[in-house]
Image: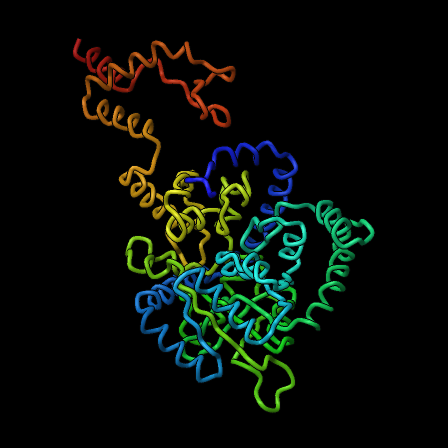
Amino acid sequence: MMPTRLNFRTQTVQSLADEKLQANLAHSLSQSCQKRRVMVESLPDWEQMRDRAAHIKNAVIANLDRELAAFADKAERKGFELLWARDARSARDHIVDILTRHKVRTVVKSKSMLTEEIELNQFLSEHGLISIETDLGEYIAQISRQRPSHITAPIIHLSRRDVGRIMHEKLGIQYTESPEELTAAARKTLRSAFLSADAGISGVNFGLIDEGSLVVVENEGNARLSLSLPPVYIAVMGIERLIPSMADLSLFLTLLTVSATGQRISNYVSIINGPRRTGENDGPDKAYLVLVDNGRTDLLHDSRYRSMLTCIRCGACLNICPVYRKVGGHAYASVYPGPMGMILSPLLFSREYYRDLPFASTLCGACSEVCPVKIPLNQLLLELRADLIQSRQRPWWEHQLFRLFALCASHPRLYRLMAYLGSSFQFLFRSSDGGLNVPRWSDQRYFQPLARSSFHSLKHGLRRRKNR
């Protein structure tokens, strides 16, 4: 049975104690941020691009019902068979039904956070279907039975030595730490899967409203093989992943790839216009598009959090976040970690289970600064914190402490008395580093001791001296 809430504190303690994880995160995330920084500095109109993209996405989301209907109509005209999924269960059922009708036994999948969100791989396995992840990082995570720890770099928590050991143990290849040799070994294994698969499944980065086309962005070519070689293709898309037209695509491709990997453009951009037509040499015989809601409509109706639907899943907020950089993705126990996950996980999945996540932030605002579509993530975290406190989804002792603080703060004499008592007796709680030993807080952070004299007492002392 699933516990009532995530014990985020326990997860973080384990992550902070893992020296190898700390080294892997520090190395990989520093490189990611540096690559992005260099690329952003080469684009003098970067801020104007962010402004334009935010305006476009917010306009689409504000009229999502109308835009979605227009997109669906164009997609059907191009030969896509559309299926609407209210939640994760109905999305999985639609996909299994398609695969059953076409007597599919083996599926190749390209990287998709949405299929992770609906837990598709496990569901396919339960129905006797073989599902093979073809993105290299996702493939390593799959064969080692690990969950991805980052939305664009699934095995950022692993080193080359870890990957070499996993592939040696799971694939029986000779141990090596060479990225080229490891990639070649994986490619050899996956090539036969591409050629023998009965169906391919991919996520969707963007849906083009005016064209009814799908856009898939990648760096390895595996997505293109997954959607073009098997006779059956299934695209799984969140209902919010729309942009107006092909004319807007170059803007969003630049923002996505610069923010995600520090590239001007990714290696592969596939624009899918339905099943293979007469005279075409490749492409699927049948193309399906599963449009998934899974809580997005509820988010759409809440004006405070609606801007989260503009997220393009670049991962930049994870890379820059000081909390994520120390604890990694697995500590969040969600498909969406980091700042965007602190908001999406409670809103889409469970406020009770993920009630600690919005508080796992320094509110430094770095995530908002790097977001390519200017989502005010730190402000949304504050909103969500307030919601959780007002709904009493916080520990009882926390409520009592804040009530005590509110009482003291609203009565100046009481506040000064408590400040005086605190400064007078703080020697009883001194830690070895000279700060205050506050339970739990001081395990990882320094708590500044109280000043011997308050600003209020100094001000009044100065005033008395002036009056003499």
Vertical order, 60 against 279 (above or below) = above
Left or right, 442 with respect to 170, comes to left
Quarter of the rendering containing residue 387: top left
Furthest-left residue in this view: 467
Does any portion of residue 374 appear in the rendered image? yes
Residue for point 58% across, 50% down: 147
| Percent coordinates x, y for residue 280 in the rendering | 62, 87
Vertical order, 197 against 345 (above or below) = below
| Percent coordinates x, y for residue 132 in the rendering | 64, 62
Left or right, 14 with respect to 394, comes to right
| Percent coordinates x, y for residue 398 in the rendering | 33, 29
Which of the colour schemes (rainbow, by chain, secondary structure, one colour) is used?
A: rainbow
- Between 54 and 406, the residue placed more toward the observer is 406
Residue for point 62% across, 56% down: 138
Which corner quadrant holds the C terminus? top left
Left or right, 81 with respect to 384, comes to right
Furthest-bottom residue in this view: 279
Quarter of the rendering containing residue 202: bottom right
Residue for point 53% across, 32% down: 13
Vertical order, 370 against 242 (above or below) = above
Does any portion of residue 47 appear in the rendered image? no
| Percent coordinates x, y for residue 171 in the rendering | 76, 55
- Number of marks present in the image shown: 0
